[in-house]
């Protein structure tokens, strides 16, 4: 596999990968909204300010990252901010993935829906709402998707037991 | 079971002012053409579909949650159970993701055997799809033919992995075992006879007027819609988007294989049928190349703290015994980080997102399954079309509910 370079921190990524199409697009769009960056194991991760995710998705889409491949969450309980949303975005023309990341607090776990950018985010956002309890503002149909509508709790949260009775 | 008319979906439809002319029709979850446990709620005007809502989750088993409580190597058998028609593709994707986290180099022989087996998995999956899809639209005969060949593939899997369906043959760092004696000859015999079997299916279906009428112009999906809705694989290539992870972002030595990626620009069920049929021919091609150029050498990476030692070594060497004991009882720590690994599974782009916190158990494993996104396109395909076309459309997108619900 060979040695891959690793970059950590916003400044390092913005500088070290200045020619990367996604970095370039986001830097031109709103540099202040990029909170953190990481290039690790050949994968680029950019942390975006929570309020700006929809606009950031628009910006990378215009830069050629045309396909939302995956959207999911990670619960970092007990650390704060607790939830991390990961958007895996693919460019069919550049043949390359990027990952946008949003950190969400436990107190008000809500983020803007990106269904207006990629309608395909619909099921993914519903899945996160169902299993993590993160709300998506502006989602057309935010209902539970896997579990019954009257289910209590969000099973993929770390404080939800793996087995046994609740 | 609540009264159907009181379910939230139907309440919502009523609230939106569904006129009296329209009828709400429930299809599934126990319906033979839904390929599992899918419930589709349809709003119809006469026989025309006005709205379609897919209700999923009947097979939700919380596999992602279970993964978090297992050691990395214990997750491999769980990945089989996500998509019971393509276990090797799931095994491969998960192993590649963890190997990327570990920055582990896999010996060429293991990579080639992986390619060989995942292509056989693609044939296996496409055979089931072809048989059931044809059956859904009225061509009952074909299922008997495709299951005949599928049986051969399952025997090959049993030969190599000891299991027909839940293979768990790929391991983090390589393969479980060296394939048994005579295995490659067996695959060779199967692959040599297979192209004429594809011709046989094609003879039964391609000129068949009923089959053509049921598929042509039905379930049309444009390229723009396919991209917007996250549709991948043969469904996307049937709509004219020329992208295949095997060719464009190669993994597991696919760059060393020569194959074509079939694309059609029509976007209907027929296009998806043609693309998949051609994909089967290409898979045969890849398997043949894998057999011809199979490298010699080890089938496991040289990483004694991650890969279990040989049985013989474990019984004679102290060091190997210690490693064996440690891996089985404590697992192995994976450096902190997050990776996303995509592969081209039989159903489209499959991705595993694995997050490690530096311990021996994954902090988070998420599967991006192609069927989950493909199902979202069902409404676009069926809106304004006849009710009976819904069955053809569901069949043509090749979904497996196990991987949708996980």
Image (spheres, coloured by chain):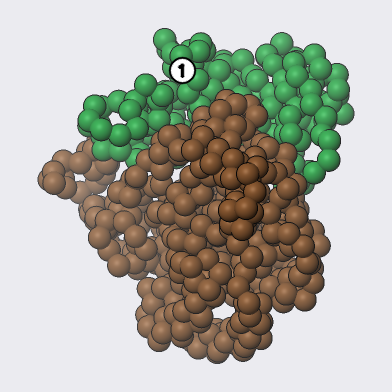
Chain colours: A green, B brown
Q: Nearer the viewer, residue B179 or B38?
A: B179
- Residue B341 visible: no
Above/below status of B388 relative to B59: below
For mark 1, what is the residue?
Answer: A77
Residue at 58% x, 53% y: name it.
B315
Q: Quadrant of residue B67?
A: top left
- Residue A161 visible: yes
Where residue B181 sits in the image (x, y, percent)? 63, 77
Where residue A16 sits in the image (x, y, percent)? 86, 22
Residue at 82% x, 34% y: name it.
A4
Q: Nearer the viewer, residue B361 or A4?
A: B361
Dot 1: few (<14), some (14–19), or many (≥20) neighbours within 10 Å?
Answer: few
Where residue B134 sits in the image (x, y, percent)? 43, 77
| Label 1: chain letter | A
Where residue B258 sits in the image (x, y, percent)? 79, 68
Residue at 77% x, 62% y: name it.
B297
Numbered disc total: 1
Q: Nearer the viewer, residue B313 or B142?
A: B313
Judge left or right: residue B187 versus residue A62: left
Above/below status of B178 relative to B207: above
Above/below status of A53 relative to A164: above
């Amino acid at each position: 596999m060979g040695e891959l370079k690793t970059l950590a921190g916003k400044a390092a990524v913005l500088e070290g990968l200045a020619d990367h199409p996604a970095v370039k697009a986001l830097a031109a769009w709103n540099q202040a909204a990029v909170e953190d960056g990481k290039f690790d194991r050949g994968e680029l991760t950019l942390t975006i300010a929570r309020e700006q995710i929809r606009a950031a998705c628009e910006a990378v889409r215009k830069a050629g990252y045309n396909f939302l491949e995956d959207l999911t969450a990670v619960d970092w309980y007990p650390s704060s901010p607790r939830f991390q949303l990961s958007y895996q975005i693919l460019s069919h023309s550049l043949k390359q993935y990027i990952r946008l990341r949003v950190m969400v607090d436990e107190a008000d776990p809500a983020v803007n829906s990106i269904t207006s950018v990629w309608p395909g985010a619909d099921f993914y956002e519903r899945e996160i709402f169902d299993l993590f309890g993160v709300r998506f503002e502006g989602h057309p149909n935010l209902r539970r998707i896997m579990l019954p509508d009257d289910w209590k709790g969000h099973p993929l949260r770390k404080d939800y037991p793996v087995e046994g009775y609740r | 079971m609540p009264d159907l008319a009181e379910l939230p979906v139907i309440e919502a439809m009523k609230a939106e002012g569904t006129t009296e002319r329209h009828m709400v029709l429930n299809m599934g979850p126990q319906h033979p053409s839904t390929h599992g446990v899918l419930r589709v709620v349809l709003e119809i005007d006469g026989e025309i579909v006005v709205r379609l809502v897919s209700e999923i989750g009947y097979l939700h088993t919380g596999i992602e949650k279970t993964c978090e409580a297992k050691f990395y190597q214990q997750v491999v058998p769980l990945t089989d159970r996500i998509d019971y028609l393509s276990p090797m593709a799931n095994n491969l994707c998960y192993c590649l993701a963890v190997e990327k986290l570990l920055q582990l180099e896999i010996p060429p022989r293991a990579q080639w055997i992986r390619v060989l087996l995942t292509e056989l998995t693609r044939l296996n999956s496409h055979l089931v799809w072809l048989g059931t899809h044809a059956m859904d639209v009225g061509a009952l005969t074909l299922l008997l033919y495709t299951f005949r060949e599928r049986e051969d593939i399952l025997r090959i899997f049993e030969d190599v992995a000891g299991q027909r369906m839940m293979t768990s043959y790929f391991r983090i760092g390589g393969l479980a075992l060296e394939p048994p004696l005579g295995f490659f000859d067996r695959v060779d015999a199967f692959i040599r006879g297979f192209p004429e079997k594809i011709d046989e299916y094609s003879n039964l279906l391609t000129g068949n007027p009923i089959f053509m009428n049921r598929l042509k112009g039905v379930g049309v999906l444009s390229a723009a819609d396919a991209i917007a809705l996250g549709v991948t694989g043969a469904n996307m290539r049937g709509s004219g988007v020329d992208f295949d992870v095997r060719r464009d972002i190669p993994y597991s030595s696919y760059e060393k294989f020569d194959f074509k990626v079939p694309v059609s620009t029509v976007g209907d069920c027929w296009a998806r049928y043609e693309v998949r049929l051609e994909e089967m021919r290409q898979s045969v091609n890849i398997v043949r190349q894998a057999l011809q150029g199979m490298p010699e050498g080890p089938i496991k990476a040289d990483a004694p703290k991650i890969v279990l030692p040989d049985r013989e070594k474990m019984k004679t060497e102290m060091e190997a015994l210690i490693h064996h004991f440690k891996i089985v009882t404590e697992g192995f720590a994976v450096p902190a980080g997050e990776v996303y690994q995509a592969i081209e599974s039989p159903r489209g782009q499959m991705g595993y997102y694995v997050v490690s916190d530096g311990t021996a158990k994954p902090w988070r494993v998420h599967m991006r399954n192609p069927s989950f996104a493909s199902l979202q396109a069902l409404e676009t395909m069926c809106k304004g079309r006849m009710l009976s076309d819904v069955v053809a459309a569901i069949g043509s997108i090749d979904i497996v509910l196990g991987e949708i619900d996980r």
